[in-house]
Amino acid sequence: MTKQELKDRHNTIKPYIHRTPVLTSRLLNEISGTTLFFKCENFQRMGAFKMRGAASAISKLSEAQKSKGVVTHSSGNFAQALSLAALSLGVKAYIVMPSNAPQVKKDAVKGYKGEIIECPPTLEDREQAADLIQKEKGATFIHPSDNLDVILGQGTAALELLEDHSDLEYILTPVGGGGLIAGTALAAHFYGNNCKVIGGEPFEVDDAYRSLQSGKIETNDTINTIADGLKTQLGDINFPIIQKHVSEIIRVEEQEIINAMRLIWERMKIIIEPSCAVPFAALLREKEKFKHKKVGIILSGGNVDLGNLPF
Amino acid sequence: MTKQELKDRHNTIKPYIHRTPVLTSRLLNEISGTTLFFKCENFQRMGAFKMRGAASAISKLSEAQKSKGVVTHSSGNFAQALSLAALSLGVKAYIVMPSNAPQVKKDAVKGYKGEIIECPPTLEDREQAADLIQKEKGATFIHPSDNLDVILGQGTAALELLEDHSDLEYILTPVGGGGLIAGTALAAHFYGNNCKVIGGEPFEVDDAYRSLQSGKIETNDTINTIADGLKTQLGDINFPIIQKHVSEIIRVEEQEIINAMRLIWERMKIIIEPSCAVPFAALLREKEKFKHKKVGIILSGGNVDLGNLPF
């Protein structure tokens, strides 16, 4: 990976993504004692940064590969992202979803013309179903986070943030499957001016924190967190990048996530999903570390069920 | 009122207000068949356009008047706006509020250092209490909407919108006390290129619609609407401006307001209050009128009680 490769990838995907705004808040600066720059990926197409990685991965395929389509397994934002990116690039998308996925998520994928393949709700069943599509249709499998092209795409959010504010001392992101934080760490390494990247992770699913401690990929025994985008584990491709370029992971309690989410809703008047509130919660938990610093926060997404809010 | 006076007033209040962003949404354009430009006053200081009018009115006072403070009666956004504008301009603010006003509203005023005077919850009691403060303290009364300096201040939102998008064919605002729509109509008259101004109003409190029909200021017998910012009636100063420069008022049902609010929350990922959703609801109700037009919508505010949402 080079600085130029990241730049080129950004140019490639520009037609398919929004350059999202960077918002500031006097009140949240006062509350945190920090100068904050919020990169609003909740305003990204389909409502999350995942659009960047999906567009990046599809755009790298050969014409022969594109003609046979792409496949992934996801019940979350990547299902929508791959469907919309594929639609935008004129490619067929097959989305393996567990049969118990919420109807609203299935409808969103259908809205973007993704073809849903339902399977029983276990990881094994998902992988089998995705394998079958690859064999039967010749479609290319795109992993939601452990794929270098996806990682590069996710890194373009931090690239844009650093283009706008080159003097950031920290950038914070949530840590789920590891694609966003790995891409952000690469962007900060190439384009930052000694800019440290820190992850926020719920105590309830602190596999990434433990992985950095032990030096190998750890998993979660239970996944009882409101941050439903952060339940997955790191992968072989993103983990070494995270080990090399991420400074630290800060863990937060569930109530801290809800409080941070509510603060952003009430003070900034924008809608973010619970996973998205985790890095801001981490900053509030360790205020002293960030005092008087310039800090970028990637607001990862805004897809919430308004009928089921935690407040 | 002249074009230059509006421009000058804008320059005067610039240090005390945000120039709010104008957002667009591909999805809402598709749904409405219109090209929409949302002026985001929900991102304004204290969360609503009222900050503009309050800053405008206070900035016009003499030094002698400023030294004695300002007073208003309001339990809504203008209470917070006058408090924050007064604080920003180094002026004392007295806010007459009904004793049954929600604690969260009282706390917001106190947060901006406004001094609350409680009174029984009738208009007569409010006016008496405000009169008393004028006599005892020498404070200047600032009406939330029927005051020419307030009207000019509210008009600066549309002025900024037209600076950014000079070719708008319509601008839509909610209609409550009449300050915002009157100011918007003046701005469109001076700065628009044949730009029509249309108001949105709930059927449940359609006093402004009926006032335009009858030619005199009408009142509401009942005020059963979710749009709690729109329950007040027009005034002697703003009504003639509205008669002269507003093309039309479109009325909407309560469920249309809730649906429009939810659409904006879900698709744009921004928080708006029910009153703020009314003009977009009006546009959706009369889609044909706005088809293929360029339409600006003033998103008036984002102060909602997250614990009491209509969905």
Image (cartoon, coloured by chain):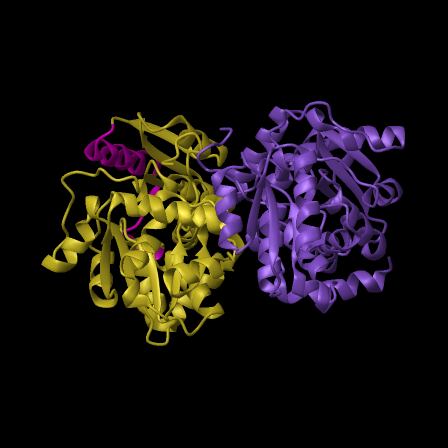
Chain colours: A yellow, B purple
Q: Is residue B221 left or right of residue A287?
A: right
Side (left or right) of A107 relative to A217: right
* Quarter assignment of residue A38: bottom left
Residue at x 42% of width, y 44% of height: A81
Residue at 28%, 43% (x, y): give it: A255
- Position of the N terminus of chain B, as image quadrant, is bottom right
Q: Is residue B22 visible?
A: no
Image side of residue B59 versus residue A121, left or right: right
Q: Residue at x 25, y 42 (%)?
A: A231
Instruction: Give the tally of numbered discs.
Output: 0
- x and y percentages locating residue B296 in the rendered image: 71, 47
Q: Residue B190: where, in percent of width, then height?
A: 84, 56
Looking at the image, residue B36 lies above or below residue A75: below
Tell me where residue B41 appears, x and y as whole percent: 62, 50
Where does the image place residue A310, in percent across and percent down from the top left?
Answer: 36, 36
Question: Where is A124 relative to A5, above or below?
Answer: above
- Residue situated furthest front in the rendering: B136
Do we see residue B247 in this rendering?
Answer: yes
Question: For residue A151, what is the image quadrant?
Answer: bottom left
| Residue furthest out toward the left | A214
**Span shown in magenta:** A121-149
Q: Compare residues B235 and A19 and report the one nearer the observer.
A: B235
Q: Is residue B123 left or right of residue A163?
A: right
**For residue A42: magenta?**
no
Is residue A129 magenta-colored? Answer: yes
